[in-house]
Amino acid sequence: MSAGAKYLPHVDGIRALAVLPVVLFHLGAQWIPGGFVGVDTFFVISGYLITGILWREMDPEPGDTRRFSIWVFYQRRALRILPALVIVLAATVVMSALVQTPGAQASLGMQVLAATLFVSNFYFWQNEDYFAADPSSLPLLHTWSLAVEEQFYLIFPLLLLVVARWMKKRVLVVLTAVIALSLLASIFVTSTEPGTAFYLLPTRAWELGAGALLAVWQMRRRGTASNPWIASAGLALVIASVFLIDKSMPFPGTVAIAPVLGAVLLIGWARATWVGRVLELKPLLYVGKISYSLYLWHWPVIVFWRTVTGNALDPIEMAGLFAASFLLAAASTAFVERPFRTKQVRALSPRRVLIPATAVILLCATVGGVWTRYHFTPIPIPAAAQEIAATAEYSESASYREQFRRGTCFFSGKETGAFGTYDKDVCATPDPTALNVLVIGDSHGAMWWRAFDLAYPDAHVMQATASGCFGLAAGGGEAECLELRDWVWNELIPSGEVDAVVLAGRWQPDSLPAVERSIETLASEGIRTVVMGPTVEYDGDLPVLLSRSVQFNTEFDFGSLRIHQRDAVNAQARVVADTAGADAYIDVIDALCGTSPECVLQAPDGTPMQFDYGHLTLPGTEWVIDEVRDQLDPYLAVTPAADER
């Protein structure tokens, strides 16, 4: 029994093994760090099943009257994909209007448009890192994989048709070559542009191609194989992948070979083995049958729940959301998908299916386009909420550039050659006529520069900052960070022209020994030292959380405040600063929150204190500096005499 012939129940069991890890991963189950590889298993299954049908029609057995038609093929794809997808898109639009903030709603139109036209992978490739994306604004992020599949099926049937007509005997060679080229591209691109490799078809085609190759090979040998040892190896690979792979690994590339090979071995050799019998257990079969709807529904359900609560999920919420997704998937399969799979519907001519399907696609695309073009919001959003939400785009603003001086005095430590963009003349050339203050740190250090510059106009405030690295006297880091660090600590600090240093960063316990070493070094040079403590942080971007409370007229949920995590580091940093001899330790958390369980959310002008989870806006840093001015003035407000330098 081969692909394209009869129903293979164990394949539905494999579908269950694919979808369940994806859902659990998206729910935040940390014990299954590689759950996202379930999508790779789906790709193999899809390539296997679809190619089996295509090749059977292109190379029919004697007596088989079926022949390949591109229109019939797309008719089948439309009936399979569109009904549930359209319902999910409609539900997503409605829920977005009810619970999402202005910023999130603004991006939804493009997500709907991209999902409808099956180009989501391109949209998210240009706009979002899959693993770093903020889920609260991306309810259709998961549609990237549908886009990859449908793009594959725009091209692959035509390639297969050419092979069937002119190179039929070499079909396995051609498919192997396609897989090899795509896999090599995936390995190379993953090492240089992992986001590109993750989202785009050329670096994912080998996964669908692996299933296609298996299908054609089986049909050539006229039947599936059965081997418990090979099937067991496949099961081990699939299960091990979801537990041993994690998002820190370069993916897909070579890492994806394990789940893809495992899926191939399971599909090809599990039938009539103990593995196959496990895969054919009724619970797994049922999950496999609803897997498409479960995949579609689970992510919007999670996103909208987290949008409403604003917090990470606890185990009870995880279980509830899993159950809700499961029930929606079951209903969707029964009442949306199955009515379009009846013999009567399948017997319709391609024209009677494809014309309405095209109309539905155009309608959904129009909704997405209009939403995007005219910033359409079905439910009016208060102007105050819109103004607050706009701060989420702060990093693209002139205020951000003024505050951080990115590209001049603040660069990414992970970008090769970035230190070459650091302008020493502008950023860190001492002024012999003024008090020279140097701000050293990462992005949480760079955010303070402008506030100090404004607060102490008689001082000359300099800046040596890079994202992702502290620039301290000790400790490792990226090569670009080390270049900045070496220049600052081996040349600038010993020059005798720096009067005071502000150390600021997103301190972690393992960074504090380097902070201590830096303070001691500065003290030995006779340089005044101010250490800025960590800021408060939130589970999510503060403008989004705050605009939501204004939009829906609710109290701000301080449950999203990660105060306890940062309090511990704050206390440790204070001890280190005091022990090492820092002149001042500025407790930023105390300035923002005091002893209250609530913290200051907005600067006097209404701007949110932070523009993301923790980085302060310029008005936010100015407010904090004003609050702690009495602690800073003794070290930064007095210009030393020339003989003190």
Image (spheres, rainbow, N blue to C red):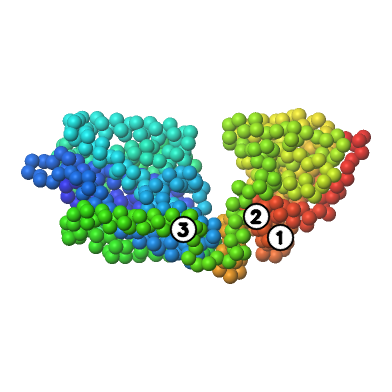
> Residue 5 location in percent, x, y?
16, 47
365, 341: nearer the viewer: 365
The first of marks 2 and 3 along the sequence is: 3
Identify the residue at horizontal 62%, vertical 51% (top origin).
394
| Mark 3: amino acid | Trp
Element type where label 3 sits in the image: helix
Identify the residue at horizontal 74%, vertical 42% (top origin).
439
332, 384: nearer the viewer: 384
In space, the residues marked 2 and 1 are separated at their CA atoms by: 13 Å
In space, the residues marked 1 and 3 are separated at their CA atoms by: 31 Å
Q: Residues within 10 Å of mark 1 (few under 14, many from 20)?
A: few
176, 278: nearer the viewer: 176
> Residue 109 location in percent, x, y?
45, 56
What is the number of the mark on residue 421? none
Element type where label 2 sits in the image: loop
Identify the residue at horizontal 73%, vertical 45% (top origin).
449
The first of marks 2 and 1 along the sequence is: 1
Element type where label 1 sits in the image: loop
Q: Is residue 515 left or right of residue 147?
A: right
Asked if the residues shown at circle 2 and circle 3 are in contact, with their CB atoms under 8 angstroms apart, the answer is no
Give residue 281's quadrant in the image: bottom left
**Quarter of the rendering occupied by the N terminus:** top left
Q: Residues within 10 Å of mark 2 (few under 14, many from 20)?
A: many
Of circles 2 and 1, which is in front? 1
What is the number of the mark on residue 605? 1
| Mark 2: amino acid | Gln
Asked if the residues shown at circle 2 and circle 1 are in contact, with their CB atoms under 8 angstroms apart, the answer is no
The first of marks 1 and 3 along the sequence is: 3
Of circles 1 and 3, which is in front? 3
**Quarter of the rendering occupied by the C terminus:** top right
In space, the residues marked 2 and 3 are separated at their CA atoms by: 28 Å
Circle 2 residue: 610
